[in-house]
Amino acid sequence: MSILSVVEWVVWGIILAFGLWFAIGIRTAAVRHAPPPLWPTLIISFSLVFLPLLFLFLPFSKLHIIWILLILWQISFMAGVRYIPLISKLLIWPAYIYACILIMGTGASLGSPSRYSPWAARQPKQWPWLTNKIQKNTQNLSNGGRLDNTEKDYVNFLYEKLWRESLCEIMPETTAKEIATELLIPDKIDGFAFAHNYSTFLRRGFPPAESFLFPDKVKNPCTASIMEASRPSNYILSFPDWFIAAYPDVFMWFSSEQRQRVRNRKGDEDIADVMTSLVYELFKINPENKKLQATDLYDSDKKWLPKWLKNLVSSYKQETGKIPEASVDETKDSLAKEIYHRKEIQ
């Protein structure tokens, strides 16, 4: 066997190993009820397994898999995120069938590719416009407008002008107002950073297609920890998407505290008891309150209610001495800083 043949088989084995690694990851994410991947991710995962198996029967050099994968990698973004007639169907349908086989028996389901969507599951339809909406609201607010002197009127004004329209795209208005007035506005969360964090989270941390085509023109105003918080392996089912987008550092801090408490537990301590104790402590829940029901903690989707998430943010500030990283940077001359401080405009 020649050296070239050995190299071919080594490359073939590495690519197939990556394909199997992707497959295990998708299956694991489905078992954990983590958010499903994007169509581009499924296309590449399918290609990493299909191409090596196909080249077992083709008389060509297995090194050809490399350049074919590079082309498929580029096309997968446009086929999955930017719809290409015929090509999208030719790539998405095989990836869809492949993924359905992988997640069989887990109880998870994928969105049908018969209806165009860049995501392998249902997501808020308006999310690509969320960033633009917040940016437009921010610019309009900076152009002037009367702010009343009382703190309540000021909060209501910011909700109506900065948060209402954009948040109501992704949640009911009553929930949106509670979240904005109880958390986002008091913590001075930058709406523009929130919007970019939210879209990054929905992409599961995957960069937008434009970043590969125009790397010098795509800005990334996301906060530092959103990429780590977006990984399916870090997903915690009980946390709503909006919270991870607004407080990715708080979310990761909670995850870190969980792991640390489990590592430091005594030998005879049950993991479930340790985790429960941590939740009671950080969410400031009184376990002796006999009237407290599950419906008082979670919404209909089994996500933490804003009042308890507010307590978690409070615990984060007390324990770390930090403010959330998506908060307006007081040290910079930013538009968001100007908006949050303009309380007396005639």
Image: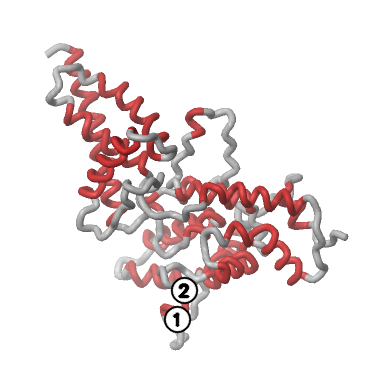
Residue 2: x and y, percent?
Answer: 15, 11
Which is nearer the eye, 70 or 29?
70
The residue positioned 34% from the left and 36% from the top of the image is 88
User: Is there any visible trace of residue 314 in the rendered image?
Assistant: no
In this rendering, would 230 be left or right of 337?
A: left
User: Is there any visible trace of residue 282 in the rendered image?
Assistant: yes
**Residue that extends furthest to the top in the rendered view of this protein:** 2
Task: Say how many tags the image has.
Answer: 2
Residue 334: x and y, percent?
Answer: 73, 46
Q: Residues within 10 Å of mark 1 (few under 14, many from 20)?
A: few
Residue 50: x and y, percent?
Answer: 21, 33
Instruction: Tell me if residue 313 comes above or below residue 333 in the rendering.
Output: below
Q: Dot 1 lies on which element?
A: loop
The residue positioned 45% from the left and 83% from the top of the image is 292
In space, the residues marked 2 and 1 are separated at their CA atoms by 7 Å
Instruction: Tell me if residue 286 comes above or below residue 321 in the rendering.
Output: below
Q: Which mark is residue 280?
A: 2
Q: Which mark is residue 287?
A: 1
Instruction: Tell me if residue 211 comes above or below residue 293 in the rendering.
Output: above
In this rendering, would 148 be left or right of 45?
A: right
The residue positioned 48% from the left and 45% from the top of the image is 227
Three-letter code, disc 2: Tyr
Q: Earlier in the sequence, mark 2 or mark 1?
A: 2
> Do the CB atoms of the residues marked 2 and 1 lie less than 8 Å apart?
yes
Three-letter code, disc 1: Pro
Question: Which quarter of the figure is the N terminus placed in?
Answer: top left
Q: Residues within 10 Å of mark 2 (few under 14, many from 20)?
A: few
